[in-house]
């Protein structure tokens, strides 16, 4: 092996290493087939070049993959951003709507307060002259102010009937405004349900007799005593029985039942009258609502009885509802918790204004 060719081979190696350093990885040092030390060195350098090439290719592949990932990430970031923008816009719109609803709610509450105050004041103001009129009519009727003819007496009876009707209406309006303004006071007392229901049915007997209606009363003997405002619960029973009489044909039957049902006392008033259409069965518990306003007003009602009854029952922690089939009849149900009510009644939010309006 002469010196020059050795030098050439070393030069080739240096050259190759320089090229590799500049980024050419696909080159290799040709073998001289001398099998000497320089050859082993060349093989070593070639192996290193192979290693470097493999590592560089690996790094390039990873780079390409992470570039793809970056693009994907950028795309999903853009999508997230636009979703966020949309959400922000929706949120802003929601905030505005909420604000509007709140303002309308405040307005509604104020209006409701004005209405309650108006009802309260007017009904109080109407009651005072009413008692004076009633008193004088009674005096004329009993001839305290001189003799009256038969015709005058008949006329006075009609006046008295209408005055009583008006008085009843004023009383109902007062009750509604008390329930609405949460000032209705309940007077709780220990009550025997059987006695209370039977006594109430008795007071309704004369109106039932006018239409030859039979009222059957079935009350479970073991029904426990409960603490309720007896007069108010009687008012509910009178109301539902008087409706049952009003909307039932002559000679029909009314069933009044009461039993204990778990933690509640259940009272049912069943009639076989005209019934109530399904879509009206909730509405009849609203103030001034009547199924047939023209017809039903002729019966002397104003659509307040059931709203008051609902208020009274809710105030006692019970529920009131109706099941009815048009042409077949209705069953009004109400419940009263066996635990009874506390001393202080806080009133109820009959129109649900506290919970976001009607
Ligand atoms: P009203 O003084 O008009 O009877 P209520 O609040 O007691 O007022 O009842 C509201 C309406 O519900 C009535 O006008 C009537 O249309 C309907 N209603 C109530 N009870 C009965 C019933 N037993 N059968 C049929 N309809 C009824």
Image: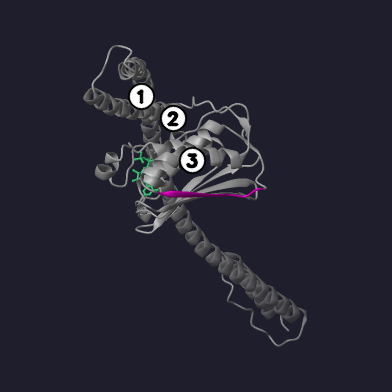
> Alpha carbon of mark 1 to alpha carbon of mark 3: how far?
25 Å
In what element is the residue under mark 3?
Answer: helix
> Alpha carbon of mark 3 to alpha carbon of mark 2: how far?
21 Å
Numbered badge on residue 180: 2
Q: Is residue 163 above or below residue 201?
A: above
Tell me the mark number nearer the camera, choosing from 1 and 3.
Answer: 3
The mark nearer the N terminus, 2 or 1, is 1
Q: Quadrant of residue 180?
A: top left
Task: Using the image as rendered, state which of residue 223 and residue 335 is in the foreground.
Answer: 223
Q: Which residue does the image show at 42% across and 39% down from the upper left?
A: 206
The mark nearer the N terminus, 1 or 3, is 1
Please state the horizontal and vertical placement of residue 265, each as a whole percent of the image: 60, 45
| Left or right relative to 227: residue 348 | left
| Left or right relative to 346: residue 10 | right
Q: Which residues are magenta?
A: 213-221
Please state the horizontal and vertical placement of residue 6, each as a whole percent of the image: 70, 78
Numbered badge on residue 119: 1
Q: Quadrant of ligand 1?
A: top left
Q: Which residue is mark 3?
A: 237
- Say whether residue 21 is visible: yes
Work out which quarter of the rendered image holds the N terminus and state it: bottom right
Crowd band around label 1 with a 10 angstrom C-alpha radius: few (<14), some (14–19), many (20+): some
Query: How many marks are shown on the rendered structure?
Result: 3
Question: Looking at the image, do the residues carrying marks 1 and 3 touch, with CB atoms under 8 Å apart?
Answer: no
Please state the horizontal and vertical placement of residue 345, each as a whole percent of the image: 56, 28
Does the beta carbon of the residue at mark 2 sit less than 8 Å from ligand 1?
no
- Say whether residue 285 is visible: no
> Would you say the magenta stretch is mainly helix, strand or loop?
strand
Q: Is residue 258 above or below residue 12?
A: above
Q: Which residue does the image show at 57% across and 65% down from the upper left?
A: 22
Q: Which residue does the image show at 35% across and 29% down from the upper left?
A: 169
Task: Using the image as rendered, state which of residue 115 and residue 232 is in the foreground.
Answer: 232
């Amino acid at each position: 092996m002469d010196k020059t060719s050795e030098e050439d081979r070393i030069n080739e190696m240096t050259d190759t290493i320089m090229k590799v350093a500049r980024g050419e990885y696909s080159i290799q040092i040709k073998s001289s087939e001398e099998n000497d030390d320089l050859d082993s060195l060349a093989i070593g350098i070639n192996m290193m070049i192979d290693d470097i090439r493999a590592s560089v290719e690996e790094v390039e592949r990873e780079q390409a993959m992470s570039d793809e990932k970056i693009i994907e990430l950028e795309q999903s970031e853009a999508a997230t951003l636009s979703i966020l923008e949309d959400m922000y816009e929706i949120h802003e719109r929601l905030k505005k709507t909420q604000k509007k609803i709140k303002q309308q709610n405040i307005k509604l509450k104020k209006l409701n307060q004005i209405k309650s105050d108006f009802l309260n004041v007017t009904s109080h103001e109407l009651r005072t002259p009413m008692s004076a009129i009633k008193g004088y009519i009674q005096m004329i009727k009993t001839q305290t102010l001189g003799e009256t003819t038969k015709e005058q007496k008949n006329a006075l009876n009609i006046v008295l009937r209408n005055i009583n009707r008006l008085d009843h209406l004023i009383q109902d309006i007062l009750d509604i405004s008390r329930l609405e303004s949460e000032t209705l006071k309940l007077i709780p007392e220990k009550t025997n349900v059987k006695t209370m229901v039977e006594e109430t049915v008795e007071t309704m007997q004369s109106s039932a007799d006018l239409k030859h209606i039979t009222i059957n009363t079935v009350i479970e003997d073991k029904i426990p005593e409960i603490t309720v405002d007896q007069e108010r619960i009687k008012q509910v029973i009178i109301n539902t029985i008087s409706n049952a009489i009003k909307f039932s044909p002559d000679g029909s039957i009314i069933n009044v039942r009461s039993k204990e049902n778990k933690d509640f006392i259940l009272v049912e008033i069943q009639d076989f009258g005209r019934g109530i259409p399904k879509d009206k069965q909730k509405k009849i518990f609203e103030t001034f609502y009547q199924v047939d306003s023209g017809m039903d007003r002729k019966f002397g009602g104003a659509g307040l009885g059931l709203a008051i009854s609902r208020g009274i029952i809710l105030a006692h922690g019970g529920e009131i509802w109706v099941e009815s089939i048009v042409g077949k009849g209705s069953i009004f149900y109400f419940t009263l918790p066996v635990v009874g009510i506390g001393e202080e009644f806080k009133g109820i939010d009959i129109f649900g204004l506290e919970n976001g309006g009607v």
